[in-house]
Image: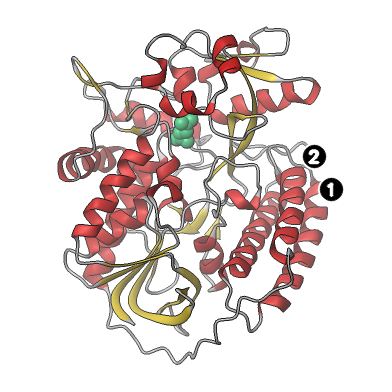
């Protein structure tokens, strides 16, 4: 199969890139998802931040830079805030018709940790789903050819990237492309304990790294402070924005001891506090200040996931959980990677916006802004697709029973214990040895086999190693990278 632009992924970054590129080029989208709730975007709860009508853009810029511990790239942040705010209105609201919640004065703007203003557009606490459904509707109306339930296994090409080897429907084939955009979402399965949907294995980051692209800032893994401690689902920061508080096992609030903004402190500070309280006891999110008659309508996702006992008492046990990779494939202002004909957008990319930590509700904004930019640039500059001399091996997914699951268990255990919310040098060195061994075992099995599960496992191990190597190199505690020794 041949195309001008190949897009891998169909969350907000991939779908935006594909929609924009298809306005002037032939586009193929390869996506593992078959339903909107299978993407990271579809699971996003909080919302989309954009400059509030009455505020100076600089206030938003400052919040993004401060949340990123001063490590962000100012030009990229300016683009995020100024252009991002515009495309939220023009593309999401006007063109796609996403219905964000309104009150009598216009949009009902929420506030979350690290924001100095109410500026977050939301759709209850299921914003990502509303955005994803609208994107897929628009993508279906476009001329892009969408291959659902398909997996890109690896990038192909000798000088730059000429497309990808793809499997799906029991078949393996090469998509030859003039430009390739990677937008595969999160890395949750590298840790197991995650707010991401199943299947988030950092495929784009790993494929780009294996092809020789520059990858940076992978030590900056953001842990969300309030996932359910036992059942794992996310309790949106918007709950704290509306008044929910964090308490210890004795019902005492503890966030004021960590930061003057209490529960609305930057996410890494709240995550560290919850992690510390959980070392000797259990932290709870006390929802009683927000549980009223409107709770089920305002926070339908939380409401559906909580038990009657939890909504009656208001107390929900919480723990940090892997949420977002701030680093990734290094890209410029148009989503171009360091390799010819390869782009990345969304969580796969390192645009420089997040620095050492990400401000709440900026991931959809970044995916949208860089997705549209990458799609437009790729379409305008796509070279003639080059022929790829690669006969894919026959499709062969046979493996000993439990092979992939057992290796994932080993990966996730070592990543959580040695490269999780708190890291030290000895632990990181041990993690590196274990991951190198795992990589060797997986590599020898992957040879001659075309199995999406095996490639996802390989990708997750590659991403784990990228995180561990970067975490070892950076001896300072900064943003969401916390080194204790
Ligand atoms: C949340 O709803 O707490 C997550 C929002 C985000 O990660 O930006």
Label 1 crowd bin: few (<14), some (14–19), many (20+), radius 10 Å: few
In x, y percent, where is residue 378?
A: 28, 67
Q: Is residue 216 above or below residue 400?
A: above
Quadrant of residue 56 in the image? Answer: top left
Q: Quadrant of the N terminus?
A: bottom left
Q: Position of residue 231 (x, y in %)?
A: 63, 33
Q: Is residue 135 above or below residue 49?
A: below
Dividing the image into 4 quarters, which one contains the C terminus? top right
Find residue 279 and report its horizontal and vertical position in percent. Answer: 78, 25
Given residues 319 and 257, the one toward you in this image is 319
Task: Point out the tag, 2 or 1, that comes first from the N-terminus.
Answer: 1
Which numbered tag is attached to residue 485?
2
Q: Residue 306: where, in percent of width, then height? A: 55, 24
Question: How far is the residue under mark 2 from the one under mark 1?
Answer: 8 Å
Query: Crowdedness of circle 2 by 10 Å Cα count: few (<14), some, many (20+)?
Result: few
Kindly identify which residue carries mark 1.
426
């Amino acid at each position: 199969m041949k195309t001008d632009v190949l897009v891998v992924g169909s969350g907000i970054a991939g779908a935006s890139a594909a929609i924009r590129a298809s306005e002037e080029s032939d586009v193929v989208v390869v996506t593992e998802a078959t339903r909107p709730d299978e993407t990271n975007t579809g699971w996003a709860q909080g919302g989309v931040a954009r400059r509030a009508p009455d505020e100076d853009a600089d206030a938003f810029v400052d919040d993004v830079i401060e949340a990123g511990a001063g490590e962000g790239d100012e030009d990229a942040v300016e683009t995020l805030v100024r252009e991002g705010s515009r495309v939220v209105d023009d593309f999401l609201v006007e063109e796609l018709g996403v219905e964000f919640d309104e009150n009598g004065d216009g949009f009902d703007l929420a506030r979350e940790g690290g924001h100095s203003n109410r500026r977050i557009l939301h759709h209850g606490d299921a914003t990502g789903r509303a955005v994803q459904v609208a994107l897929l509707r628009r993508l279906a109306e476009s001329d892009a050819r969408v291959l659902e339930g398909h997996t890109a296994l690896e990038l192909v090409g000798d000088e730059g990237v000429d497309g990808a080897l793809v499997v799906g429907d029991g078949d393996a084939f090469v998509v030859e492309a003039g430009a390739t955009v990677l937008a595969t979402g999160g890395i949750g399965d590298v840790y197991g304990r995650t707010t991401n949907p199943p299947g988030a294995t950092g495929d784009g980051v790993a494929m780009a790294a294996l092809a020789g692209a520059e990858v940076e800032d992978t030590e900056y893994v953001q842990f969300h402070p309030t996932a359910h401690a036992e059942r794992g689902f996310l309790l949106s920061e918007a709950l704290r924005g509306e008044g929910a508080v964090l308490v210890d096992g004795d019902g005492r609030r503890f966030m004021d001891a960590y930061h003057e903004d209490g529960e609305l402190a930057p996410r890494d500070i709240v995550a560290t506090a919850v992690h510390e309280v959980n070392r000797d006891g259990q932290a709870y999110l006390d929802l009683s200040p927000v549980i009223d008659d409107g709770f089920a309508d305002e926070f339908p996702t939380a409401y559906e996931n909580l038990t009657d006992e939890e909504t009656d008492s208001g107390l929900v046990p919480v723990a940090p959980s892997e949420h977002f990779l701030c680093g990734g494939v290094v890209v410029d202002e148009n989503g171009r990677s360091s390799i010819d004909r390869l782009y990345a957008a969304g969580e796969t990319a390192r645009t420089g916006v997040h620095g050492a930590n990400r401000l709440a509700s900026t991931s959809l904004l970044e995916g949208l802004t860089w997705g549209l930019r990458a799609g437009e640039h790729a379409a305008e500059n796509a070279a003639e697709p080059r022929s790829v001399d690669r006969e894919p091996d026959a499709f062969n997914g046979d493996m000993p029973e439990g092979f992939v699951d057992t290796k994932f268990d080993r990966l996730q255990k070592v990543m959580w214990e040695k490269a999780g919310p708190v890291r030290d040098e000895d632990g990181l060195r041990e993690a590196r040895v274990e991951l190198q061994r795992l990589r060797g075992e997986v590599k020898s099995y992957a040879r001659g086999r075309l199995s999406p599960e095996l490639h996802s496992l390989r990708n997750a191990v590659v991403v784990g190693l990228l995180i561990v190597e970067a975490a070892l190199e950076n001896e300072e505690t900064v943003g969401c990278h916390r080194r204790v020794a």
